[in-house]
Each structure stands twice: as structure tokens, then as C-alpha cells.
Image: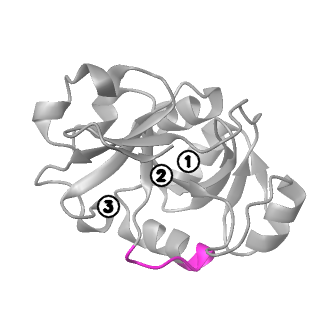
Amino acid sequence: MIPKLNPHDASNILKKGGTAIYPTEGIYGLGCDPFNSKSVENIFKAKGRSKNKSFIILGSDIKYFNNIIDDTYLMDKSLQTINFTTWVVPCNKSCPPWLKKDNTVAIRLTKHETVMLLCDYMNAPIISTSANLSNSEYDDDLKNIEKVFDEKIDCIVTGQLGNEKKPSTIKNIITKEVIRV
């Protein structure tokens, strides 16, 4: 069984390179410290995910994206609006290569209490991807998720799922093109 921890204790696991299952606005996610390449690699392995795909990075405050996105966009009003939109933004030179796709990165500000606590206790953003195996249907039953990821993920963060019924909208910050509705 995967240990169930409060956000504070789970953040300590993530800071040390661990991985977590946690509730988000609409689904359970898998996450880790985005700046720890080994942790990110563990998420790729746990999901069976192709390295050609990138992850969304969640933060509770725009400041957590300072080391990731181009400074030009830090003050963009679109990014600072909390409306369950993920933005594809040009990355900066200090953005780790494993987070980039075509010199961009996908980020989202969150108001989900558990995710906000994780970020704030870590003083950093977190990786976010759905808690299912790649090319498999998502199942929001936490017991089933735990069975799938037993011995692959370090902890489950306690908290409630939000009320969103579909994934976040994804938009390009420059073109405003909608990539996913």
C-alpha cells in the first residue's frame, strides 16, 4: 500500500526526489519536483509515457514559474487569471530540458487547496499528469489508481478532488490558439 500523507509531509517526500498521487481540480494527478530530473524520469516510467510528450507544471503563484518561463510573460494578465486554463509559454534559458517541448512549457496557476499547499510547502511548482498508465483510460477510483501505481509512486496526498468534469483548456500564450478544449 502507498502511504497516505497530508500535503506538508508529502511535500517533504517530493523535495527529497519522491513522487506522489494527488487530487487536482478534476482528476487525480501524478507529480514530483519538476527540477529533479530523476523524479521526472520516475513519473515517465511509472506511467509508461513516451519521452516525446511533456508535462503540465502547476503552481500556486506566478513566482514559481520564474525559473521556467520567459520573463516577458511573467506579467501577462492571461497567466495570472485563474480560470482552469493551461498556457503553453516560451521557456527561458534556465528551464530544464526535460520540461521543454519546442522551447515552450505548459503551465497552470491553480486554486486547488491541496495543490496550493503542496506548492507552497515545497516553495516550487509541481509536475502534473493524469494518474493513469499511458494509452489507458483514466479511472477516478483512488483504490484502483493505488493498485496500478503500487510500488511505483511514493505517497498519496490526502485531499478532495475539485468539481471540474473535463481536463483544463490548453492555449498558446502568443497566438491564443486553443490546443485542447
Cα distance, mark 3 to mark 2?
17 Å
Q: Are marks 3 and 2 in contact (CB under 8 Å)?
A: no
Which label belongs to residue 126?
none
Q: Secondary structure at mark 1?
A: helix
Tell me if residue 48 is in the magenta stretch.
yes
Q: Distance between the Cα atoms at labels 3 and 1?
A: 22 Å
Q: Which residues are magenta?
A: 45-52
Q: Quadrant of residue 171?
A: top left
- According to the image, label 2 marks what residue? 15
- Are the residues flagged by discs 2 and 1 in contact, CB closer than 8 Å? yes
**104, above or below 7, in the image:** below
Up the image or down, 92 lies above or below 24; here it is below
Which residue is found at the position 19% from the left and 39% from the top? 174
Q: Earlier in the sequence, mark 3 or mark 1?
A: 1
Give, as a three-letter code, the residue at label 1: Asn
Residue 168 pos. (x, y %): 53, 40
Q: Residue at x 76, y 40 (%)?
A: 158
Which residue position holds label 3? 99
Residue wearing tag 1 = 12
Name the residue nearer the viewer: 24 or 8. 24
Residue 55 is covered by the magenta coloring: no
Q: Residue at x 73, y 61 (%)?
A: 138
For label 2, the SS is helix
Q: Specify the amino acid type for callout 2.
A: Lys
Residue 80 location (% of width, % of height): 34, 22
| Residue 107 visible within the image | yes
Three-letter amino acid code at disc 3?
Answer: Leu
Q: Residues within 10 Å of mark 1 (few under 14, many from 20)?
A: some
Check the picture and name the quadrant holding the N terminus: bottom right
State left or right for residue 1 relative to residue 100. Answer: right
Q: Residues within 10 Å of mark 2 (few under 14, many from 20)?
A: some
Q: Main secondary structure of the magenta part?
A: loop
